[in-house]
Image (cartoon, rainbow, N blue to C red):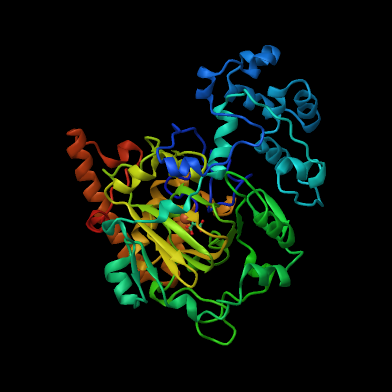
C-alpha cells in the first residue's frame, strides 16, 4: 500500500500517513468533460463560482480585499495556511472574499491535525469541529461574485459523482476473477498479474462478523490510526457518516490485531484463527526477519470516495487486499524499464519521487479516460468477501465505491524474492518500514536471515540476482556503448527486470 520503488523518505509522509500510504501533491489541469457529471455538482453553499465566470461578471468581490486582492488565489490560500484560528477568524470578518478564503475547510483540517484536541465532537466539517460550533449555530454569508478555482475546485471534487468511473470497464482491462488458486498455479502463472479471488475470504471466521458496526460496538473507545490522528472508533464512525471532504480521512491501522486481540498467527482453518493469508500466496519470505520485519498488515476503513492515490507498495513487496464490507475500484499499471508511469503520474529520473494529483477525484476527472486507454491498464471491482492481489512493483489507485472495511497484508513470495533483494540492495534510499537501526542494512540482514533459515531459497535468489546484474550490464553497455564497469557507476541499478518482468506485462 505504500509507495515502494517510488517512496521517497524525503517526502514528509511520516507525519501524515502510515508508511503504506503517502499523499503526494501537485495540481493537475482541471476540467470536466462529462456534462452529466458536472450537472450533478450542487451550487457552492457560499455562492463561489469557477474562475472563468469572472470574464462575464460585472463585479468581482476579490477586488475589495485590499492588498490581498493582488495575490493569486493559490498564494493567498498558501499564506492563510500559516495563520492560526484566531487570525483566520479576524481576517475572515473583514470582507466577504476573505471570509470565503478563510472558510476553506482544508485550512481547519490542518489546524485540527496539527494540534488534535483530546476530546471533541465531530460536527460535519473541520472548522465546526475545531471551533466546537454546534450545527444550529453555523452561519453562512453569501459570497456571490467571487470567482476562484482554488476555492471552487475542492468543493467540486468533493461533490462530483465518482462511481461511474468504475463502470463499463473495457474487456482487455478487466482484472481476472477466479474462485481460488493453488500455490503452484500462483507461482507458475500469477505472481506478476493482478487478480481477484472470490472464495478464500468467505471462509474466514471474521467475514460477515467484522463489520464497521461490530467494531463500533466492541471497540468504541479504542483509538485507531487515521492518517495523522488516532481517533476512537465512535468518532471515526461519526466522521464516516457525516463529512464532505474532497479526500476523506482514511483509517489505516497497522496495530489493529493487537488492539482488537485478533490472532494473526494461528494456522489457517484452525480453531483460533480469525483470518489467514490466502493459501495460494505460500510462505512469506519476510517472515525470516522476525522482530525486524517492516509493518506488514493493516486494517483499512473509509467512507465512499476515500481511497489510495497512485503508489507502489514498499520494498518491492506484493500484497493482498481483502474487502470485508463495501467495495473497491482498482486501477492498476505494471511498471518497469521502458514502461511509462500511469498518465498523470510523474516519476523523477532517479525513480525516488512520484508526483500525482492530490485527490482521487481530481485524478478521475482529469486522467481516468486516458488511463483507461493506456496499454497495460488493469481495472476491477473487489466486492465484500473477495481479495485482490497486488503484484510487486505495480502502480495502483484505489477508490472505495461504498463505505468499506478491508484487511491488507504485504508479503514476499518466493518468485519475487529476486525483486525484493534487488530493491533492498540497489535502492537503499527508498527502503522503508524498517526500524531506523536496521534500515541501512536491510539487505544484509535479510540475506543473513535467509541464509540461516532457508539457504537453498537464498541461493536461488542470489543466482537470479547475478543473472540480472549481467543482463543489466549488457544493456548498460549497449546504451552507453562505453563498456563502463558496474562498480564505476556506484553500483547503481536501473532496476532492469529479469526475464519475467516484461513477459507478464499484459
Ligand atoms: O484499500 C486501499 O485503499 C488500498 C490499500 C493499498 O494500497 C494496498 O493494499 O496495497
Ligand atoms: Fe498499496
Give coordinates of residue 366: x percent, y percent.
Answer: 42, 39
* Foreground pick, 400 / 114: 400
Q: Residue furthest bottom?
A: 271
> What residue is at 52 percent from the left and 37 percent from the top?
25
Is residue 349 visible in this depiction of the protein? Answer: yes
The answer to whether 34 is drawn above or below residue 173 in the figure is above
The total number of labels drawn is: 0
Q: Quadrant of residue 417?
A: bottom left
Residue at the (33%, 42%) spot, across then down:
370
Q: Please, is residue 159 above or below residue 482 in the view?
A: below
Q: Quadrant of the C terminus?
A: bottom left
Is residue 345 visible in the rendered image? The answer is no
* Residue 134 coordinates in the image, percent (x, y): 82, 46
Q: Residue at x 38, y 57 (%)?
A: 392
Identify which residue, 37 or 259, lies in the foreground: 37
Which of the 4 image quadrants contains residue 75?
top right
Is 368 positioned to the left or the right of 48 in the image? left
Where residue 313 sits: x, y (%)?
A: 45, 54
Horizontally, is 364 left or right of 501 in the view?
A: right
- From the viewer's perspective, tell me whether residue 190 is left or right of residue 46: left
In the picture, measured across the screen, residue 21 lies left or right of residue 279, that is right
Q: Position of residue 77 (x, y in %)?
A: 63, 27
Amino acid at each position: 500500500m505504500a509507495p515502494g520503488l517510488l517512496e521517497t523518505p524525503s517526502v514528509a509522509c511520516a507525519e501524515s500517513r502510515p508508511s503504506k500510504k503517502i499523499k503526494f501533491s501537485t495540481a493537475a489541469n482541471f476540467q470536466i468533460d462529462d456534462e452529466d457529471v458536472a450537472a450533478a455538482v450542487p451550487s457552492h453553499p457560499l455562492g463561489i463560482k469557477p474562475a472563468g465566470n469572472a470574464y462575464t461578471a460585472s463585479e468581482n468581490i476579490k477586488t475589495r480585499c485590499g492588498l490581498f486582492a493582488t495575490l493569486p488565489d493559490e498564494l493567498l490560500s498558501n499564506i492563510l495556511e500559516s495563520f492560526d484560528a484566531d487570525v483566520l477568524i479576524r481576517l475572515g470578518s473583514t470582507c466577504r472574499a476573505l471570509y470565503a478564503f478563510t472558510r476553506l475547510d482544508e485550512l481547519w483540517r490542518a489546524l485540527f491535525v496539527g494540534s488534535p484536541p483530546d476530546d471533541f465532537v465531530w460536527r460535519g466539517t473541520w472548522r465546526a469541529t475545531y471551533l466546537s460550533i454546534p450545527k444550529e449555530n453555523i452561519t453562512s454569508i453569501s459570497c456571490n461574485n467571487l470567482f476562484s478555482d482554488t476555492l471552487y475546485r475542492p468543493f467540486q471534487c468533493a461533490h462530483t459523482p465518482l462511481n461511474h468511473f468504475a463502470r463499463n470497464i473495457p474487456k482487455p482491462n478487466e482484472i481476472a476473477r477466479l474462485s481460488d488458486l493453488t500455490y503452484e498455479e500462483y507461482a507458475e502463472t500469477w505472481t506478476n498479474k493482478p487478480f481477484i479471488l472470490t472464495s478464500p475470504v468467505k471462509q474466514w471466521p471474521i467475514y460477515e462478523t467484522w463489520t464497521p458496526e461490530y467494531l463500533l460496538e466492541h471497540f468504541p473507545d479504542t483509538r485507531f490510526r487515521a492518517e495523522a490522528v488516532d481517533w476512537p472508533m465512535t468518532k471515526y464512525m461519526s466522521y464516516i457518516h457525516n463529512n464532505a471532504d474532497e479526500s476523506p480521512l482514511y483509517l489505516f491501522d497497522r496495530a489493529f490485531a493487537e488492539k482488537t486481540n485478533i490472532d494473526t498467527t494461528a494456522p489457517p482453518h484452525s480453531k483460533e484463527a480469525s483470518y489467514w493469508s490466502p493459501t495460494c500466496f505460500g510462505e512469506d519470505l519476510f517472515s525470516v526477519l522476525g522482530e525486524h520485519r517492516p509493518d506488514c498488515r493493516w486494517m483499512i476503513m473509509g467512507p465512499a470516495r476515500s481511497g489510495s492515490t497512485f503508489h507502489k507498495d514498499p520494498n518491492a513487496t506484493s500484497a493482498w487486499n481483502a474487502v470485508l464490507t463495501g467495495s473497491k475500484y482498482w486501477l492498476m499499471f505494471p511498471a518497469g524499464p521502458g514502461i511509462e508511469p500511469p498518465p498523470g503520474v510523474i516519476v523523477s529520473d532517479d525513480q525516488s519521487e512520484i508526483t500525482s494529483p492530490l485527490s482521487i477525484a481530481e485524478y478521475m476527472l482529469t486522467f481516468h479516460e486516458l488511463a483507461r486507454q493506456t496499454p497495460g491498464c488493469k481495472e476491477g471491482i473487489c466486492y465484500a468477501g473477495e481479495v485482490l492481489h497486488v503484484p510487486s512493483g505495480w502502480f495502483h489507485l484505489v477508490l472505495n465505491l461504498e463505505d468499506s472495511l478491508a484487511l491488507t497484508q504485504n508479503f514476499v513470495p518466493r518468485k519475487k524474492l529476486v525483486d525484493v533483494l534487488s530493491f533492498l540492495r540497489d535502492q537503499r534510499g527508498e527502503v522503508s518500514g524498517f526500524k531506523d537501526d536496521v534500515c541501512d542494512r536491510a539487505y544484509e540482514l535479510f540475506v543473513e536471515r535467509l541464509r540461516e533459515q532457508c539457504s537453498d531459497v537464498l541461493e536461488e535468489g542470489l543466482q537470479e540476482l547475478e543473472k540480472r546484474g549481467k543482463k543489466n550490464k549488457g544493456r548498460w553497455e549497449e546504451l552507453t556503448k562505453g563498456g563502463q564497469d558496474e562498480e564505476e557507476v556506484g553500483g547503481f541499478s536501473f532496476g532492469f527486470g529479469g526475464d519475467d518482468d516484461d513477459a507478464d506485462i499484459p
